[in-house]
Amino acid sequence: MEDVLTEIPPPSRFFQDDLNNFAPPSPSLPSPFLLFPKSKPNELLRPSLLVIAISSPSLHLFRHLSAKTLIGSLILPEIPFSGNHIQPSVDDKSCDIYSIDQDNELIILVSVQFSVPAERSLLVAKLLLDNKIIPERVLILDSLQSQNFRGKLSPDETFAFKLETSSESKRNDEGNDGSQMLKGLDYYPSGSVVDGLAAALLGRCQMKNIKGALCVSWPEYGSEVLSLLKSLLHQNAPLQPILEFCTGSNNGDEYANRIKDLDLYT
């Protein structure tokens, strides 16, 4: 007679994947969307330059642009509004869209002040480049992530690299040095990668045949990398109009003090 206590039980009639079929599917997240309160429903924005700031130094720099006008926001439904200020603040978790009118040319700045999940990056990239904003050129400013870099990185080093779409690279090869966005920067080393929102945006530019460039800087924080970014913008003719509206001569000191304050709570 079999011992029911010590006998090996028979295998389950279901595989683990089959058991999951009985669980209700996870509800899908609402799609992100753009909000332009003062524009007409079918009105398209056609800026000569679209600048998307993702890195901490670029966000801090553009916060000091005095002549920018808030025209809209990108809403990611899973990001809560609780804790945000009535007026735009660097401490908010938001994605604000600003405009600058320079010599009858429209420049649009997008400040991405929250972390976009990898699985949502493509949707956000499509919104910023396909929906209502049709730019001639795009500049993306992000930080270099150490896990994506093929080589050793020291926090005492400060540098930046670039990646370009084929149409932007072709423009530079044709000798239009005066209109290069990232003139003088080395290309991102082979074997290193870029992921997340920056990669989705640059890939979307490539698919849409938009002249686009991505600048990744290191380290992620510090007054030195802020100074490097300002110098980079000053050296490139298409970007100089942006810094003409930059206020305050001690941005680097304020930024360094802010990072020290944040370090006290980490």
Image (cartoon, grey):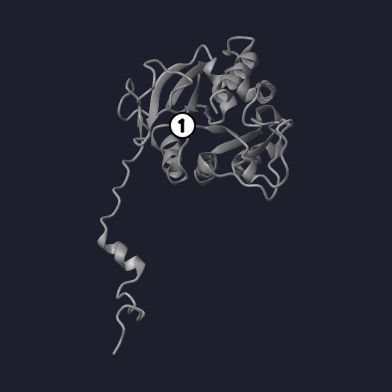
As displayed, is residue 84 above or below residue 145?
above
Which residue: 52% across, 11% down? 66
Q: Residue 169's spot in the image, x, y percent?
A: 65, 40
Which residue: 67% across, 44% down? 149
Q: Residue 119's spot in the image, x, y percent?
A: 44, 46
As displayed, is residue 110 above or below residue 255?
below
| Nearer to me, 200 or 135 | 200
The C terminus lies in quadrant: top right
Q: The residue under label 1 is which amino acid type?
A: Phe
Side of 119 where 53 appears, left or right: right
Which residue: 35% across, 27% down? 81
The N terminus lies in quadrant: bottom left
| Nearer to me, 47 or 21 | 21
SS state under label 1 = loop
As displayed, is residue 41 above or below residue 24?
above
State the image quarter where residue 78 is shown: top left
Q: Residue furthest bottom?
A: 1
| Residue 264 in view of the camera | yes
- Say which residue label 1 marks: 114
Q: Residue 221's spot in the image, x, y percent?
A: 62, 27
Q: Residue 139's spot in the image, x, y percent?
A: 57, 32
| Residue 104 in view of the camera | no
